[in-house]
Structure formats: structure tokens, C-alpha cells
Amino acid sequence: MDLDERVTELRTQRRRKYFVRGIAFATASGICYGMYTGFITLAETQGVWGEWFAGGEWGGGNPALSAFVISFVLAALAAGLNDFFSGIWSLLACAKNRQLGDFWKTIKTKPGLIMMICAAVGGPIATTAYIIGLNSATAAGNPGVIVPIAALNCAIGAVLGRVFFKQELNAHKIVGILICLFAAAVIGGTSFAAMGPEALLGCLFAFIAAFGWGFEGCVAGFGTILIDYRIGIAIRQTTAGILELFVMFPLLACVSGGVGSIPELAGAALTDPALLIFVVSGFFAMPAFSFWYKGNSMCGAALGMACNGMYAFWGPFFIWLIMGALNIGGMAADYPPLSPVQWLGALIMVAGIFCIAVDPSRLFRKASEEATHV
């Protein structure tokens, strides 16, 4: 083997390792997203949060809080706490890597502004809707069922990319979208049959979350390709946390007619021991997004989104593991009672996401060519 062939081989090996590392980052982002979902669900069952959700129309207990406050105001507060702590973790990561100066400089740039706009859509709208969906499904006894619905963001992102940016929508993407919609219908239909209208409400808000995150994924591509992933997630999470805590939460409280409840609810949440669980959920929310950005830049946005979209499975899994199997939340060992059909629907969703991201025929053809050369 001459020198040129050796150099070419080394370059190929390096690219392959880089690609594999990108897949690892993107897969880890989906796992972290599942853990963030599990811990934030746990947080809202503990301490003062458990008391709040046990009252009102949902729990049938002391109706100290209205259904609107329980459904929407507390969801905005929970989303804000999670993203605010995630932003703090992200800033600490920037400080560790001596990137705080770059962080402040990037905010003033066009990509930084685009990232903040994406955070405004993905945070106050999508994340709050996601928490509302989780809370609705938790009230019905099974928060995990809404996670695969939220994972439709990949399919919605593909459609929005076609509508807004004229991106190509190939046959395999259309098939993948149809698979995802079928899986969502199976999960939603079985949930409604077994759990009632609360499950339908949860699935509806999970779909709103998927739409918001799909839009964010389309637009954020421009910003994240020009911004280091650590700085990008710091901008995204701090912006989302600030908007949720200081805009969305007070706004929804005003709509509910309980302006005076703002300091009372915030004070109780900030002094309750369950706040530490939000610190943990925020810790996992940071790599859930930052590893997604990193993985996309290394293995391609399509494959990175597919690997991240496996949280359709990881979300229900970690809710069951944290709140049921490990009994951290004091629940039964089989909590939540996902049916075999719902687990199957989550796996079908993952397959549909991969079909959107990767053309199966091209993948098999490439594997066949590599096998032939060997």
C-alpha cells in the first residue's frame, strides 16, 4: 500500500469514527430527553406539587385551585423552572469551556437572534404544551402515552420544511410520516378508550408541542450550523426559561383572574424540596438538546433527528423506571400501565422517524456495495 492509499484509508476511518460519534451523541440526546421527561413528571407528583394536583377538579380534593390554574398556570411554572435550571447548567458548561464571552457576543448576532426566536416557539409554546399534556395524561393515570405523540415533531418538521423552505419531500419521507401518524392514532385511540377524555386532552397538547418543536427544528438549522452547540443550547434554554417564568407564567395567571396567586405559587414552588428534582430534570434537559445539536452537526440533521426521536420509546420507559420500577415516586411497580399495544405503537413511531430521516433503499444499497467490495 503506497502513501496516498494509506492517507485515503486513514481519512475514511476518521470520517467513519466521526460519523459513529455523531450517531452516539444523537442517540444519547434521545435517552437524556427520556430522563428529563421522567424526572419532571416525578417532580410534579412530589411535595407541594402533589398537593396542588390532588386538589381542584382533577383530584376531587380541596378545590383551592381552579382547573385552569392546575392545567395551564402550573404547567408554565414547571416548564419555566425546568428550562431556567437547564439554562444555568448550560451557562456553567460554557464557563467551564471558557465560552461565556462568546455567548454574549453570539446573542447580538443574527444566528443568535434566530436561536432566541426558536426558543420563544420551542419554550413557552411547545414545552409548556408538553407539560400540559404530561399533566393531563398523569391525571388519567398514564403520562407516558403522550410522549410518542410529541415525537411527531420529526414528521411535522419534514412537512413544514416542504411548506416554508421548499425542501424535497421524497417517497420514503411520505411513507415515514404516514407510519408516524398511524402509530400516533393507535396510541391515542387506545389511550382514549382506556383512560377517557383526559388522555385525549393530553394527546392534543402533545401534538401542539410536536408542531412547535417541528417548527423550531426547521428554523433552528440556520442558527445552529453557525453556533457552537454549547453556546446554542445556552441561548436556547436561558431564553426559554426566562420567557416561561417571567412572561408565560404571569400571563396565564392573569388570564385565570388570580394575579395575587403569582407570588404565592412561585414562592411555594421555590421553597419546596421538589425544587431539587427540577434541578435534576433541567440537568438532563441540557444534553437532551445540546447533544441533539452536536449529533446533527456530525452525522447529519436527518439521521440525528431520527436518533433523537427515539425518545418516543425512552420517555415512557424512564417514566416507568423512575416512578414505577425504582419506586422513587412511591408509585406501584407497574406504573404507568402502558399496554403492549402502546409500547408497540412507540416502537412503530421510532421506525417511522427513521424512515423519514433515511431512505431505506439507499441504505441497503450502500451496505450491499460495501459488502461486495469486501
Image (cartoon, rainbow, N blue to C red):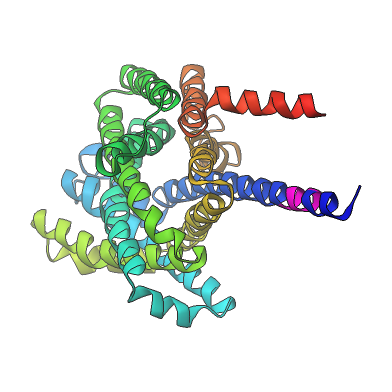
From what the image shows, is residue 25 above or below residue 81? above
Q: Give the image location of residue 289, x and y in percent.
A: 47, 54
Q: Magenta residues, as a range?
A: 9-14
From what the image shows, is residue 209 above or below residue 277? above
Picture quadrant where residue 171 is located:
top left
Q: How many marks?
A: 0
User: Is 10 covered by the magenta stretch?
Assistant: yes
Q: Does residue 183 appear in this view?
A: yes
Q: Give the image location of residue 137, x and y in percent.
A: 34, 34
Q: Residue 208 versus residue 245: which sits nearer the camera?
A: 208
Q: Give the image location of residue 286, x and y in percent.
A: 49, 59
| Quadrant in which the C terminus is drawn | top right
Picture quadrant where residue 67 is located:
top left
Magenta residues, dominant SS class: helix
User: Is 233 covered by the magenta stretch?
Assistant: no
Residue 21 shown left or right of residue 131 in the figure: right
Q: Give the image location of residue 12, x and y in percent.
A: 74, 48
Residue for point 50% across, 52% down: 288
Q: Residue 299 versus residue 203: which sits nearer the camera?
A: 299
